[in-house]
Amino acid sequence: MSTLLSIRDLKVRFRMGKLAGVPQVAEAVRGVSFDVPENTIAALVGESGSGKSVTAMSMLALLPDNAERSGQVLWQGRDLLKTGLAELQAIRGKEIACVFQDPMQSLNPVFTVGAQLVEPLVRHLGLGRRAALERAEQLLAEVGMPEPKRRLASYPHELSGGQQQRVMIAMALACEPKLLIADEPTTALDVTIQRQILELIGRLRERHRMSVLFISHDLGVVGEVADHVVVMRHGVIREQGPVARIFAAPQDAYTKALLACRPSLSENPARLMVIDDHIAAGAAGAPTAEASRAVAKPKDPRSPVVLQVRALAKSFFIKEGLFGKREFKAVQDVNFELRRGHTLGVVGESGSGKTTMGLSLLRLHEPTGGEVIFDGRDILKLSDRERQPMRRRIQVVFQNPYASLNPRFTIGRALVEPMEIHAIGRDTAEREQRARELLVKVGLDGSAFGKYPHEFSGGQRQRVAIARCLTLNPDVLVLDEAVSALDVSVQAQVLNLLKDLQDEFGLAYVFISHDLAVVRFISDEVLVMKDGRVVEQASAEQILRAPREAYTQRLLAAIPRGYQGVAAA
Amino acid sequence: MTPAAGAVGAAAERSEGVWHAAWRRFRTDRVGVVSAAVVIAFLLLILASWTGIVARDWQREVGVANAPPTFLGPRPPEAIGAIEVPAGPNVDLSDVDPLAPRYAEWEAAAQKYRTAETPKAETLPLGGDRLGRDVLAKAIKGTEISVFVGVLAAIVATTIGTVLGALSGFFGRRVGDFLEWLYNVFESIPGILLIFAFAAVFGRGIGTVVLILGFTGWTGLYRQVRAEFMKHGSREYVRAAEAIGASRTSRMFRHILPNVSHVILVRMSLLVVGFIKAEVILSYLGLGVGVEDVSWGTMLAEAQSELILGYWWQLAAATLFMAVFVTAFSLLADAVRDALDPKLRGLE
């Protein structure tokens, strides 16, 4: 197999302006070398900030203007770092094509799918309009789009996330590239859709005999598709090799940690291993810490019920015609009980109503029916004034840590504000003291107090959001996809933190997620939701071992399991 | 996961306040500092003129009519208009003049009213107007009124636009519908007619100009603030604030407002500029400041007729003052916005 792409000692740095007259430089990639042979799926794996996307984008000079590149990127023997823009543009899209993470943002909302598909065909292949349209239809059929002819005339917003990503892949395939760069192509998608896209990429590779450079933070996903794995951290390669070896006998402590930190379906430890544990263990020469092997201690099934939900329903009304409106039942007939110190997991695909259900509990969406009994009182019937003290006791952590903190508030102010509203603590000094203690409790230090949210990573922000909820001493926390936006390794840290806090404060969680593996790790009972209804409700173990509903089985089957050769061995 | 032992100790340091941090960022912005200095200089000038330290007697006719600026030198004496004086002594008409006996009497009376005839300057620093008034003094006095009108009217318009936009965008539904209706009423009447209508009701004067401009100029800002509030109202951080029990007012003005303040600041700086120009038009139409006052607007209105005769300095002075102030003010607004934006910290 000949080498298609060969990267030799690639270095990328960003000029960050001047601070006090000294030029600031951020080194994103510090000397990376690897090869992509023909007809291979190579994967770049690493956490955010590891330089994996920068490495891929630097090949086609798709980086911002302040980037400086050095080294060699040999594309079929030609150094891409030295080719001019005109030549590069001929290569872009024609020989090397890209698929990005968020299909929603990669497609132009004002053009139809057909128009966007035709453009590269006309530009690179010189096809006429009619021929191009026919080819576009073929391409859509090839990526498994139902009714390809009709879809050509649709606008991106009329398609689901998975369909949009299929369109992106079809666009990338338009000119039959030799290399497809897929930058986290499935991260924004549901597990079931992710499975379909992964299978699609595998199929297309075989049919077109092209290579794929697959970028992901999730080794589980990579293990399913890749032939060759490159693990990156802090801009350097930690380990690379064939996928079987990486999964069977990882050499680097970091690779081992990445493999271990994803909650798995086959075993259920009390705590997840995090990167630092592993590296510390590796340095000490000790075997993997035994603490993680301990099985979670059973919870007291007789602890008091804090939250009881009966026949909860929420409908939205969509205007239709001049006066008419149509009811859309987002949530209907949800019943559950939540005991102190327990966790209720809620799983389902996007659009299943799980978030709407969670927010209805806090009346962030006003439910249209049912009862939410908290501490013996139906909180849906309380007046605004009576509700205020109840608000304190049921809190929420949102999915996107970048959006849920006010960018204009320092961390300290964000933490002190809820205490001021509910008159917790005697004076400002006492509240600030408490805020600092909570920051330490969630694993940040007190110096975070005066900083702004943008100075923190996603995982750290999520810790701040958790600390903000804790300032109010809540009884129930609604965690709305609280770890979904985080890297696998950071996700493990936050999950451990949530478990620790639950043990310490006896918190009850409503844990909403699309990822059954994560839900299984943290939950005692699981609700599976589909189209606003609960389709299955059972203990976490039961759901996993003996799922009754076909939908649950499908969700379970979709979870990436890493390299299957290992599991079989 | 385990808290570092030193963490609590490090926590003792006080965090930097929002305004302090903004000031620190602002100081590093060279353009911002220079424009701030210019704006402050203008404000000092306005203060001085308001208290009467400078330009107190801008009404005095200190120079000859249309005196040119000093750097041009005095105008050459005009040749035409001199009537030739006839030769020989004047003819004595005392005998036939019925008023002759009273000349001495009048002369004596006139002695009592003797005034010192001040010599009129041939040139003035920035020239003089058609009455010989100092253009520099006029421009300074005009700055006072124009900037006062522009800034105050912008504050009125911004306040109205922000409050209504916040209410409309945050609450929507009935409140939003009502305010949209109000907005449409204001937008559907041609601006100048609206101004005439207000002027007819309020009468003439500086205060009126401020109110007219404020009441008619809020609409564009209202729409933008409304859109921003609609966007931010559904953001997760506002939801999070609702979840911790923050009141509606607190969510609107403590949480969302600082996040849209950059939009408001930029809009407001545009309004200041626009209102200074609008005052010019109003004054030109005779609806602006009174005849006993001077503003950049009245100066420009006067300059129009002078320009035909080649007297360009009044126009130049008013334009120069206006251009410098308006530019500095816009740049300052930009710099303040950047300084208040924590996301830009540490970057160029």
Image (tube, grey):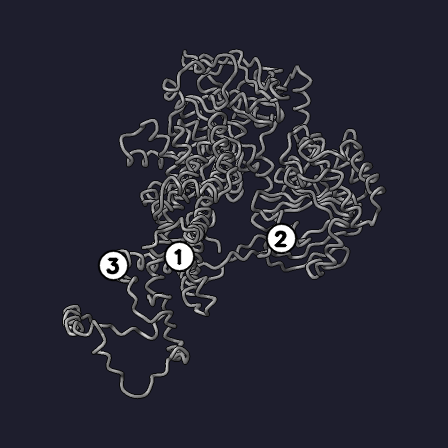
Relative height, residue B251 to residue B295 (above, below): above
Q: How far from the left and from the top, in percent, is residue A48?
A: 57, 43
- Check residue B52 in the rendering and tell me which mark sits there, or answer none: 3
Relative height, residue B48 to residue A182 (above, below): below
B62 and B252: which is toward the camera: B62
Report, in whole angstroms, how far the alpha carbon at label 2 lies from the one at label 3: 59 Å
The picture quadrant where one finds residue A265 is: top right
Parent chain of label 2: A
The residue lying at 50 percent from left, 38 percent from top is B189
Q: How far from the left and from the top, in percent, is residue A156?
A: 69, 35
| Dot 2 and dot 3 within a common chain | no
Q: Of the residues tagged 1 and 3, which is closer to the observer?
A: 1
The residue lying at 81 percent from left, 36 percent from top is A137
| Side (left or right) of B57 relative to A101 | left
Report, in whole angstroms, how far the alpha carbon at label 1 lies from the one at label 3: 20 Å
The residue lying at 30 percent from left, 58 percent from top is B44
Residue A528 in view (yes/no): no
Q: How far from the left and from the top, in percent, is residue A185?
A: 67, 39
Q: Classify mark 3: residues with Cα within 10 Å, few (<14), some (14-19) or many (20+).
A: few
The picture quadrant where one finds residue B247 is: top left
Which residue type carries mark 3?
Answer: Gly
Mark 2 lies on residue? A63
Q: Residue furthest front?
A: B96
Q: Residue furthest bottom?
A: B88
- Check residue A507 in the rendering and tell me which mark sits there, or answer none: none
Q: Of the residues tagged 1 and 2, which is closer to the observer?
A: 1
Which residue type carries mark 2?
Answer: Leu
Parent chain of label 1: B
Earlier-in-chain disc, 1 versus 3: 3
A545 and A527: which is toward the camera: A527
| Dot 1 and dot 2 within a common chain | no
